[in-house]
Amino acid sequence: MTTFELASALITLAALLAWVNHRYVRLPPTIGVMVLSMLFSLVLVGIEGFGLGASEHVQRLMLDVDFSGTLLNGMLGALLFAGALHLNLNDLREKKLAISVLATVGVLLSTAVVGAGALLIFRGLGLDVPIVYCFLFGALISPTDPIAVGAILKTAGVSDSLQVKISGESLFNDGVGVVLFILILEVATGGSGHGSEAGGSQGLMAILNLVAVEVGGGLLFGFVVGWLVYRLLSSVDNYQVEVLLTLAIATGGYSLAHALHVSGPLAMVVAGLLIGNHGRVFAMSPEVVEHMYGFWELVDELLNAVLFVFIGLEVLVLDLNTPVLVAGLAAIPLVLLARFASVGLPVSLIRRFVAFSPHAVKILTWSGLRGGISVALALSLPPGPVRDILVTVTYVVVVFSIVVQGLTVGPAARRLAGAQS
């Protein structure tokens, strides 16, 4: 099957499921599409006994698609750019302490808690998962997914102030989480070549250098690309050209960031913030702004629909068995507990500097959704039994997060009085 045929099949399926959801089911769009695609997968398995071979065709389709590469090296750039484009930079500045602490300290703390808890769960169920891979699971599941969070918060009824904190944190902790995942993966696979041969101090310096290049380089690269495109935008007044320039950021800029080995996600967030704020005010006419934001809203909706179809259909290629499913179910409260601790501790430390309502920690905990990025990171692990276990456990946590938390975060936020922070 060609790339065009694959894309056509996925977009067609996403469109049909989106129509069914909007016409009959009426769940939030992303949740509805994912749930329907999962039901579609189960129906295919159910009719397999009739000898139609339908599920085999879809399984082959899913195996033909490099989900991890497609998301991490393709779709993610556009989705993060679109998400950052709509954020107000002044609001982010006001919440910068809360966002920066939650996106860094919070991710590190959650990774540690999940890693330690996962070790106990896997050992208790007799699953042979090395310690380093337990913490690798902690790194891939700890960051909240900006794609899932952004899609759900649109209709969740969360206060504007708290929504800025949640959205800002999810955009930035994604980049932090990916860098942390890369570091632990280097240790797990020995890919960095440090180890005992390089010596402890040399290995530490190599890790610090990787962090500096990935994070610092990503932030700087995003600013440079955003500023260059801003200058180009300010020199023309043609919405077709200007939309194409922003599309070049999310595609060419993201690819170049990967080629330079700097954080593409962080680069897209910075570039999106610059274009969506400075560029919108000083480089775009009202007509351009209308077309620009209409275009990126459409791109965001399209990619979200395809992404959540991916997630729903992924159930067809999982290696499901009882111990691993039990591990996945046990990981759900573990991840929630880690999220509560990684939010509650930082908030208690900075509360004297930043205003939080008494229920902000509860909302931050329950709105910390996991999504396609966690699944993609799990799928990027080296092939083997450990990868199969972690992919299934990650999938169970993600499905619970999107469906259960996604459907209840709005009502929970509205019930908790004083959630305005």
Image (cartoon, rainbow, N blue to C red):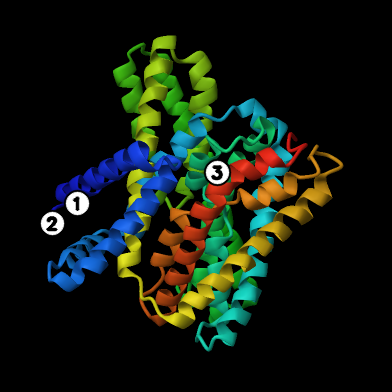
**Residue 416: which quarter of the image?**
top right
Q: Secondary structure at mark 3?
A: helix
Which label sits on residue 1? 2
Neighbour tally class for label 2: few under 14, some 14-19, many 20 plus, Cα within 10 Å: few
Circle 3 residues within 10 Å: few <14, some 14–19, many ≥20: many
Residue, disc 1: 6
Q: Position of residue 308 (x, y in %)?
A: 38, 50
Residue located at (48% from left, 70% from top) = 393
Q: Earlier in the sequence, mark 3 or mark 1?
A: 1
Task: Name the residue type under label 1.
Answer: Leu
Q: For the point 53% across and 83% down, which residue is it?
A: 130
In this picture, is 215 found above or below 79? below
Query: Measured along the vertical axis of the image, is residue 167 above or below residue 118?
Result: above
Q: Identify residue for label 3.
A: 171
Looking at numbered disc 2 in the image, what kind of residue is underneath it?
Answer: Met
The reply to whether the C-beta atoms of the residues labelled 1 and 2 are less than 8 Å apart is yes
Gap between marks 1 and 2 measured at Cα: 7 Å
Q: Secondary structure at mark 1?
A: helix
Percent position of residue 133, x then y: 52, 76
Q: Amino acid at mark 3?
A: Leu
Nearer the observer, disc 3 or disc 1? 1
Query: CA–CA distance between discs 3 and 2?
Result: 34 Å
Label 1: how many Cα within 10 Å (few below 14, some 14–19, many 20+) = some
Quadrant (top left, top right, bottom left, bottom right) of the N terminus: bottom left
